[in-house]
Image (cartoon, helix red, strand yellow):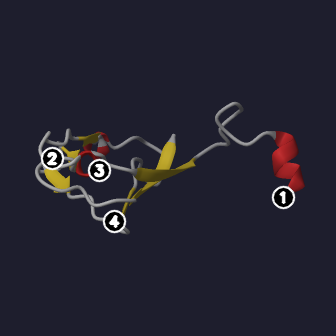
Amino acid sequence: QTLATLIVYLNDVKGDGGVTRFGKLGPLEIQPTKGSALLFFPADARGVFDERTEHEGCPIDGSGDHQDNEKWIARIWRHADRVQPPYGLREETIASL
């Protein structure tokens, strides 16, 4: 189970669209802004999934130049348990840290 999610927005999105939308929270829409971050907790303290945190990246409209029509993010998850390879770090990588 994912306990925390951090999304870092790496570029500005011009025009309409591109928001991160939480449809069951209002809806709540977050406009991507370069250098900003969004932290949320998809599970409660017991590790039970909170469906209100289901989210989506909305499409960007087709106007503007090509660079304005992209959304770049970095996403970091904190899981309740270790994620096994190939998605998590291999044992030899962890040992070398």
The tag on residue 34 is: 4
Which amino acid lies under the numbered mark 2 shown in the image of this protein?
A: Gly
Quarter placement of the C terminus: bottom right
As rendered, which of 48 and 37 lies closer to the eye? 37
Cα separation, mark 1 vs mark 3, equals: 37 Å
The tag on residue 40 is: none
Residue bearing the label numbered 3:
67
Secondary element at tag 1: loop
Mark 1 or 4 closer to N-term?
4
Cα separation, mark 3 vs mark 4, equals: 13 Å
Mark 1 or 2 closer to N-term?
2
Cα separation, mark 3 vs mark 2, equals: 14 Å
Mark 1 or 3 closer to N-term?
3
Residue bearing the label numbered 1:
97
Cα separation, mark 1 vs mark 2, equals: 40 Å
Report whether residue 79 is seen: yes
Q: Is residue 64 left or right of residue 1?
A: left
Q: Is residue 17 left or right of residue 67?
A: left
Mark 4 packing: few (<14 Cα in 10 Å), some, or many (20+)?
Answer: some
Determine the residue positioned at 24% across, 51% down.
68
Q: Quadrant of residue 58?
A: top left
Q: Nearer the viewer, mark 3 or mark 2?
A: 3
Determine the residue positioned at 88% across, 54% down.
96
Which amino acid lies under the numbered mark 3 shown in the image of this protein?
A: Gln
The tag on residue 17 is: 2
Mark 4 or 2 closer to N-term?
2
Secondary element at tag 3: helix
Which amino acid lies under the numbered mark 4 shown in the image of this protein?
A: Lys
Secondary element at tag 4: loop
Q: Among all residues in the image, which is located at the extreme bottom?
A: 35
Mark 3 or 2 closer to N-term?
2
Report whether residue 46 is seen: no
